[in-house]
Image (tube, rainbow, N blue to C red):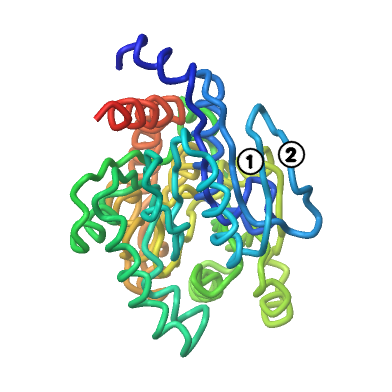
Amino acid sequence: MDNNSIVSLTQKQTILILNRRCIKNSQKGGAENYTYQMARYLVQKGFKVKWFSSKPKNLQAKEEINGIHFIRKGNELTTHFWGFLYALKKNKSIVIDEYNGVGFFTFLLKKHKVFVLIHQLYSEFWNLELGHCGYFLRPLEKILLQFYKKKPTVTVSQSTKRDLEKLGFNHLTVIPNGLEREPLNYVPLKSKKLSLIYLGRLKKTKNPEDAIKVFNRVQKTFPETKIWIVGKGPLLEKLEKKYASRNIKFLGYVSEEKKFSLLKEAHFLLVPSIREGWGQVVIQANSMGTPAIGYKVPGLVDSIQHKKTGYLVNNYEEMANIIKQIWKDPNRYIQLSQCALNWAKNFSWSKSQRDFLNFIVKNKEN
């Protein structure tokens, strides 16, 4: 990357990010965290960064956070319309259209340099979250993506890259998620009692109940096993009522410090999602010497190295069986944990941020 190119670009460019959610949205996830990390770095490098999103009732219409200018308007559906109109007025802006099931229709903009950021295709999500309506929206997602396929596009995993290539995208750059903190230098000493952890939103697409089913099966063989369910979501109340046990702890939302403390103490992270963009929690767990066992689905097949840093399985029965097998073999567990820790050292936000800036500078000049 040529520093002169960066200086020349930052002196006159605003970067407008269009994402249906902002970093303060209670529904935010890995996509918003990724965007926030990139936006902060772009600000540090001299760009003026604006982030347009929906406006939850508890948030201001305009706000500045760490140099990022947030503009909020509409709900998670109408914000795509308002965001497009806002972008239309910003002729000299670089626009990053973050496509999450649906984009901001920036393929209609003729006087802008438009980039696309896609974490994952929604695919199975539509039917699981919206029932019969999903049968209409699922093909619509792919139809709309056809209008973006010639745009320079960033995605976070080889899985999503392959999905997009099948739709005709040929200008793709993979820039994975990073890590909030440095991985440990050693595999930590964990408790003698088998400890499992689920970390994520409690919603259908994440399959949190499957993690509890794994726990129930494992506990039959190892009675002192415990599990932490970390996260909030629409399924929280239902799961708390259905699974009342002293060995199942529903912790809700926890601080970053607490999250990494739990990951450090746990023996296995359970990731029974139906699809992921990448699987940020996997690398977070690995950085604490904790292997992950997840479903063999897009995203997780990238973040979990099968039989090296964790295991990829087809269902919760297989997940439970793998845990029982490894727990009976301490040497195998130590080897798995060390490999997980080594794997995590390949990822950092600083590297991903530099690659993201390189992507913008390179494609802006082309």
Q: Which residue: 55% across, 53% down?
A: 85
In percent of width and height, residue 200 lies at 57, 58
Q: Which residue: 65% across, 27% down?
A: 67
Provide the secondary structure element on which disc 2 rests. strand
From the viewer's side, name the closer residue of 83 and 357. Answer: 83
From the viewer's side, name the closer residue of 136 and 177. Answer: 136
In percent of width and height, residue 183 lies at 47, 30
C-beta proximity under 8 Å, tags 2 and 1: no
Task: Please identify the residue farthest to the bottom as the structure is shown.
Answer: 132
Residue 205 located left or right of residue 21: left
Q: Which residue is mark 2?
A: 63
Q: Which residue is mark 1?
A: 261
Task: Please identify the residue farthest to the top as the structure is shown.
Answer: 4
Q: Which of pointers 2 and 1 lies earlier in the amino acid sequence?
A: 2
From the viewer's side, name the closer residue of 185 and 100. Answer: 100
Residue 80 located left or right of residue 174: right
In the rendered picture of this protein, how many numbered marks are placed on residues? 2
Question: Is any part of residue 221 visible from this angle?
Answer: no
Q: Amino acid at mark 1?
A: Ser
Q: Nearer the viewer, mark 2 or mark 1?
A: 2
The image shows residue 48, relative to residue 298, as above or below, that is: above
In percent of width and height, residue 56 lies at 73, 58
Provide the secondary structure element on which disc 1 rests. helix
The picture quadrant where one finds residue 260 is: top right
Task: Please identify the residue farthest to the right as the structure is shown.
Answer: 58
The image shows residue 236, relative to residue 27, as above or below, that is: below
The picture quadrant where one finds residue 73 is: bottom right
Labelled disc at residue 137: none
Q: Amino acid at mark 2?
A: Glu
From the viewer's side, name the closer residue of 354 and 274. Answer: 354
**Quarter of the figure that contains the C terminus:** top left
The picture quadrant where one finds residue 75 is: bottom right
